[in-house]
Image (spheres, grey):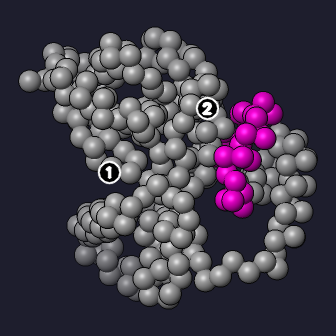
């Protein structure tokens, strides 16, 4: 039995879901498009509502939502659950799809409370938001522009020591976005502290001659675009070669779903093509 929700824009559903979590004393942080609007002023139409939650809380959350009459499922056991109502849904995110970026206590320690949906809610810190988005470099989705906008709007006040610690051995991912920032906003370069850039340039030089073995870390950035590297060309998959929170079975299911989605998107695009446009494309 579905809860009696009348609004068609999803906001009533989101507020009802927040009520469920608060009644169960379960912590959450607002992320996604709503958080991006708070920090960067970017308005984006969306049918989903992203909540960042601790991994250890996810089962209790699903139980609470089901008891309240919502459809709730653990969509991908290594990072994501969903709560649905009609065409709208809530993503319960407890780490990234690549098995990194666990939502831990620091997310909540540095959260900022602001008005969302007409009520005061905790919003995930811009540092952790940037950390998650920096890895999303799929063919159909690249969050680099979001990273640039977060840097532009929040960079001067960011905790750079914490951000560097978050990226750890993947510091080059952050560095790549910072280099792009100097191109996108040539007049905003003081936004990123000079010591951050100098340190990364020095590290890049010192590690240039280091031998990392036959390893591909591209799979941490895209779940499909580097599969030839690890399946055909003999590279070790970074998701299995280091401490990443994803099992072999979860990795198989995650990749299979990505292939299904890619095939579906291709078929949809092909169905929209007219014979003339197909001919012109071949010309």
- Residue at disc 1, secondary structure: strand
Kindly report the secondary structure that dominates the magenta region of the rendered protein.
helix
Left or right: where does residue 267 sit relative to residue 103?
Answer: left
Note whether residue 43 is visible: no
Q: Give the farthest residue toward the bottom.
A: 233
Question: What numbered label is drawn on residue 106?
Answer: 2
Left or right: where does residue 68 sit relative to residue 47?
Answer: left
Q: Measured along the vertical axis of the image, is residue 277 above or below residue 242? A: below
Foreground label between 2 and 1:
2
Q: Measured along the vertical axis of the image, is residue 135 above or below residue 161? A: below
Q: Measured along the vertical axis of the image, is residue 249 above or below residue 128? A: below
**What percent of the width, then of the height, locates residue 137?**
54, 60
Kindly identify the residue that appears in the image at 23 percent across and 35 percent down: 72
Q: Residues within 10 Å of mark 1 (few under 14, many from 20)?
A: some
Note whether residue 123 is visible: yes
- Name the N-terminal-most of marks 2 and 1: 1
Residue 154: in magenta span: yes
**What percent of the width, then of the height, locates residue 152?**
73, 39
Residue 77: in magenta span: no
* On-image quarter of the C terminus: bottom left
Q: Which residue is disc 1 drawn over? A: 76
* Range drawn in magenta: 147-172
Kindly identify the residue that appears in the image at 44 percent across and 65 percent down: 223
Question: What numbered label is drawn on residue 201?
Answer: none
Kindly identify the residue that appears in the image at 37 percent across and 66 percent down: 248
Q: Quadrant of residue 17?
A: top left
Q: Quadrant of residue 228?
A: bottom left
């Amino acid at each position: 039995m579905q809860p009696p929700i009348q609004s068609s824009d999803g906001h009533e559903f989101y507020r009802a879901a927040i009520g469920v979590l608060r009644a169960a004393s379960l912590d959450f942080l607002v992320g996604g498009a709503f958080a991006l609007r708070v920090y960067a002023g970017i308005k984006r139409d969306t049918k989903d509502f992203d909540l960042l939650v601790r991994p250890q809380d996810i089962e209790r959350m699903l139980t609470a939502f089901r008891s309240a009459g919502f459809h709730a499922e653990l969509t991908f056991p290594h990072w994501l659950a969903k709560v649905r109502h009609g065409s709208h849904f809530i993503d319960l995110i407890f780490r990234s799809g690549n098995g990194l970026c666990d939502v831990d206590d620091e997310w909540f320690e540095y959260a900022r409370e602001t008005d969302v949906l007409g009520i005061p809610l905790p919003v995930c810190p811009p540092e952790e938001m940037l950390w998650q988005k920096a890895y999303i470099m799929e063919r159909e989705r690249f969050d680099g522009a979001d990273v640039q906008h977060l840097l532009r709007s929040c960079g001067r006040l960011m905790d750079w020591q914490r951000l560097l610690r978050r990226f750890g051995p993947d510091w080059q991912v952050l560095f790549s976005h910072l280099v792009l920032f100097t191109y996108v906003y040539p007049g905003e370069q003081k936004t990123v502290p000079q010591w951050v850039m100098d340190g990364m340039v020095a590290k890049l030089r010192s590690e240039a001659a280091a031998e990392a073995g036959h390893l591909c870390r591209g799979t941490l950035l895209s779940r499909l675009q580097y599969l030839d590297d690890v399946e055909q060309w003999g590279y070790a998959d970074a998701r299995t070669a280091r401490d990443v929170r994803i099992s072999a079975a979860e990795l198989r299911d995650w990749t299979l779903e990505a292939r299904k989605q890619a095939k579906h998107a291709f078929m949809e695009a092909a169905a929209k093509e007219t014979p003339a446009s197909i001919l012109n494309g071949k010309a």
